[in-house]
Amino acid sequence: MADVKPVKAGWWNVFRPWTLHGAVVPVLIGGAVAFQTAELNALSVGMFILIMIGGCLLQSAANILNTYGDFKSGVDTVENETRSPELVTGVLTPKKVLYAGLACLGITALLGLIFIWYSGWGILVYGLLGILGAGTYTVGLSYKYHGMGQISVFIMMGLLMPLGTYCVLTGEMFSMEVLLLSLPNTFMITGVLAGNEMRDYYEDKKADAGTLIGHFSYETGMRIYLFESLVSFPILLVLVAFGAAPLGCLLALLTLYDAYILVQNSRKAPTDPHASFMLVPLCFKLNWHFGVLMVIGYVLDMNIIPMVI
């Protein structure tokens, strides 16, 4: 990664706000389905906004504590400072970064008390799992280093976050419609982490980080990355064909051009440091566009906007 320009060290890079699609899209999915039946008023809209804030705080906590954990474990070093330079260069102190991550978790827990008041104790299950997943990614259990990172993203962010959103807004613990509608985004958001592991493949191998991709060859890892990033399209088509998702969700197919750019970049990644670096941003972009367009299509097709007005 020596040919890639280092990012500017600081809190902006530690929080990584450009990764918040990981929280925003799942919450939008759960909310879109919930508001088909949930009473729509100032209180429910306010709760939806608080859910979005809580989801973003969980994502931020995972980002911040990942910076701390990777530094403490020796994964982040001066030699690979292009990805997370804050701690290895001394711009920020480990204690400040750790406290910032814990603060995000603490505020999320306080929001959880509001959610319990609004919808009941059932949401506590989703809340505890979310805090555990975000808080122990590279700290404590440090399951990232045991090849569990992608599995966690798939379950915690891809499935539990939209289901938790639905639970808060409706009081119901489970919705098959939310689960099925979440599947395309679930794979794509997991593909983002696969891209991260591919970008850092050789550095992580050197540091014995133990990521899932690191257990395979580079070529196999790239195939996993492409599968997770692209399988969302056929899944969405199947869901629409069998009536599990409304026709409007096909609006997300407009992102096939983003997918084409991602594939073209992946072919250059093995020999081009910049292309390797772009494995993650291009998947970010695809996930943002795909997820938001799918939700917009769902809302338009289900006539939720006229109902709101």
Image (cartoon, grey):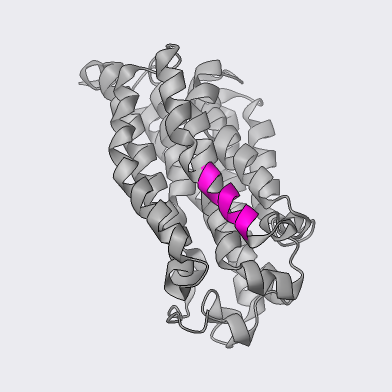
Q: Which residues are magenta?
A: 219-228
Name the image quarter holding residue 293: top left
Q: Residue at x 69, y 40 (%)?
A: 128
Name above or below for residue 217 compared with residue 116. below
Residue 151 relative to residue 9: left or right: right
Q: Residue at x 69, y 74 (%)?
A: 75
Where is residue 281? Give x, y as percent: 42, 60
Name the image quarter holding residue 126: top right
Where is residue 299? Give x, y as percent: 30, 24
Q: Is residue 226 magenta?
A: yes
Q: Residue at x 45, y 79 (%)?
A: 4
Quadrant in which the C terminus is drawn: top left
Q: Residue at x 36, y 40 (%)?
A: 290
Q: Is residue 37 visible?
A: no
Q: Is residue 135 magenta?
A: no
Where is residue 165? Give x, y as percent: 51, 31
